[in-house]
Amino acid sequence: FWHPFYYEITYEQPPLFFPLEGLFFMILGHGIFTERIYGFVVFAAVIFICVLIWNLLFKNNAKVRSYALIVAVVMLTFNSFAWAFGNNILECTMCLFDLIAVYFMLRVIPGANERWNYLLAGLFIVLAFFTKGFVGLGVLSVPFWSFIFLKRKPLQEIIQDYLVLCIPLIAALLFIIYYPPANIFFSEYIRTQVMGSLEGKRETVESAWGHFWILKELVF
């Protein structure tokens, strides 16, 4: 698990994606459509979770809830979305884990003792991190934005939510620190992939925007 191999041991990405897709190859064989089937399963799961999140956000508005599948149609209109799932890139599996985490965070009823949902959310954020690295941690901001825009909870409860949410992440960090194979892998991953990217020693972009070229593509 901690020694993904492509001609040689690679530290390009965290290792979780490879055994997940490998299960499909074990079950379905090494046919030409196995990876497509995996990609379709992930795509269908992403759409399903998006519908669940939509229903949570508009649970008091039956008319708006009935438009849930429009989410899928709108998402498919984005070329980057169709391209990503068509090519089964790592972000697709990461996206699934992060969306599941968001679902568990949003389903907590304000004032209710249901913070076990945040434990599950934290677990899926860990899985997202083990799939694609630090970008999988972006959904940690969901409780903050929920406080800003939805105003469902007082700040004190948001802080308590964060404390529970971080329990699986702290456990994962301790595991990485004290389990030698995981420690070696992530040390090399940070050194070669993360720091290399931050220092501009890896992929280069021919743009005056530099590393922020994707922001320009998304906005303009």
Image (cartoon, rainbow, N blue to C red):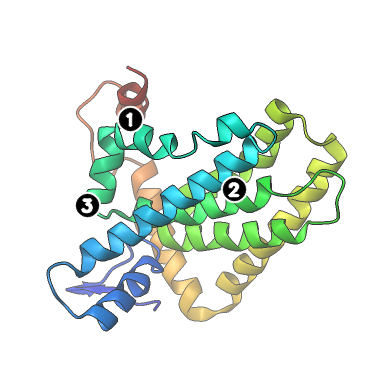
Please, what is the three-letter code of the amino acid marked with disc 2?
Val
Asked if residue 187 is positioned above or below residue 26 in the image, the reply reads above
Q: For the point 36% across and 52% down, which residue is it? A: 92
Pointers 2 and 3 in contact (C-beta within 8 Å): no
Q: Is residue 179 left or right of residue 218?
A: right
Closest to the observer, 84 or 178: 84
**Label whose residue precedes the other's in the sequence (1 or 2):** 2
Q: Residues within 10 Å of mark 3 (few under 14, many from 20)?
A: few
Q: Which labelled disc corresponds to residue 49?
A: none
The local secondary structure at tag 3 comes to loop
Q: Residues within 10 Å of mark 2 (few under 14, many from 20)?
A: many
Q: Is residue 202 visible?
A: no
- Mark 1 highlights which residue? 214
| Quadrant into which the C terminus falls | top left
Please, what is the three-letter code of the amino acid marked with disc 3?
Asn
Closest to the observer, 153 or 136: 153
Q: Which labelled disc corresponds to residue 87?
A: 3
The local secondary structure at tag 1 comes to helix
Q: Residue 115: where, in percent of width, then height?
A: 78, 56
Task: Quadrant for residue 209, please give it.
Answer: top left
Q: Which labelled disc corresponds to residue 102?
A: 2
Q: For the point 35% across and 35% down, which residue is it? A: 73
Q: For the point 61% across and 65% down, which residue is it? A: 173
Q: Is residue 217 visible?
A: yes
Nearer the observer: mark 1 or 3; the answer is 3
Pointers 1 and 3 in contact (C-beta within 8 Å): no
